[in-house]
Amino acid sequence: MVQIIAFANQKGGVGKTTTAVNIGASLATIGRRVLLIDLDSQGNAGTGLGFVRTAHKQSVYGVLLGTSKPSENILTTAIPNMHIMPSTMQLADAEVELMDLERREYRLRDALTQIAQHYDYILLDCPPALGLITINALVAANYVIIPMQCEFYALEGITHMVKSINEIHNRWNPELEILGVLLTMYTKQYGMTRAVDEDVRKKFGDTVFKTIVPRNVRVAEAPSHGKPALFYDFNSPGAQAYLRVATEVVQKIEQGA
């Protein structure tokens, strides 16, 4: 049965796309069939997998609006077992266009029923705002992973995100669960980073992933080469951290740990 995971945080710059791309690549590497859906009009997930957005017509935009089928908008990546449904700049208009459509919160969920059987994991890279596109992702998902940068304002932001997730759970998607909070861009030399780590674990306990993703130059460089960190520098600390996170995901979902 397919597992649908949304990567969401209302704050930008916390590593959502980097996390979605690298966990997707890691899951594919350990033999899972993965579809990554780019729900951000900036299109960075596609760029991180080597796609030039002007070179293809496929986009999640038409899928959300119901003007094209999901199967018509999927691209094969260079990574075995991994596909992507990219975005285009048109997606920026979707928030307004969705307002007048029937079942506007369920558009993505309804569309994914057509292709779900072909994948073990469908990963949803959300934009940094709780608009209709993110709501569509959270209504479609079984789980949410909340990437969180270790900085002063992060804990307040994540508290708001958890509240929003609970509201969506109660209103539209009773199956939605938080799979985990993932600490990213971790610099152990900074006292503030360690303090945030301690505060988050105190507040959210076992919901926080054991693995911490360090701030790593090779992870930052990888998208400019159109590759996930795992395929850019397998032995880098960042790539290995994401591989461990993917293992935790499998343990939590498939093994019920």
Image: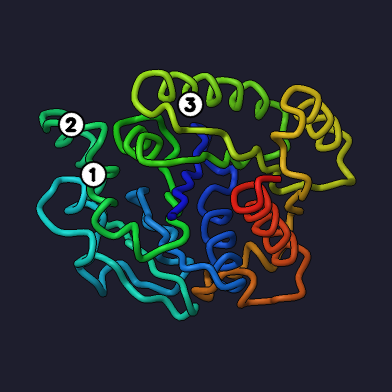
Quarter-of-image position of residue 240: bottom right
Quarter-of-image position of residue 221: bottom right
Rendered image: mark on residue 165? 3
Q: Identify whether 242 is placed above or below 14.
A: below
Q: Identify the amino acid type marked 2.
A: Arg
**Mark 1 and mark 3 residues within 8 Å of each other at the beta carbon:** no
- How far across and down, in percent of the image, does residue 10 sit? 49, 32
**Mark 1 and mark 2 residues within 8 Å of each other at the beta carbon:** yes
Dot 1, crowdedness within 10 Å: few (<14), some or many (≥20)?
Answer: some
Residue at image coords 61%, 66%:
26
Measure how far apart labels 1 and 2 are at the Cα level: 9 Å
- How far across and down, in percent of the image, does residue 43 sit? 37, 57
Q: Which numbered disc flags the more N-terminal residue, 1 or 3? A: 1
Rendered image: mark on residue 226? none
Which residue is identified by label 1? 110
Which residue is identified by label 2? 103
Dot 2, crowdedness within 10 Å: few (<14), some or many (≥20)?
Answer: few
Which corner quadrant holds the N terminus? bottom left
- How far across and down, in percent of the image, does residue 174 sit? 42, 26
Dot 3, crowdedness within 10 Å: few (<14), some or many (≥20)?
Answer: many
Nearest the eye: 83 or 96: 83
Secondary structure, mark 3, is helix
Q: Identify whether 34 is placed above or below 147.
A: below
- How far across and down, in percent of the image, does residue 138 sit? 40, 36
Q: Identify whether 74 is placed above or below 104.
A: below
Secondary structure, mark 1, is helix
Residue at image coords 44%, 74%:
50
Measure how far apart labels 1 and 3 are at the Cα level: 20 Å
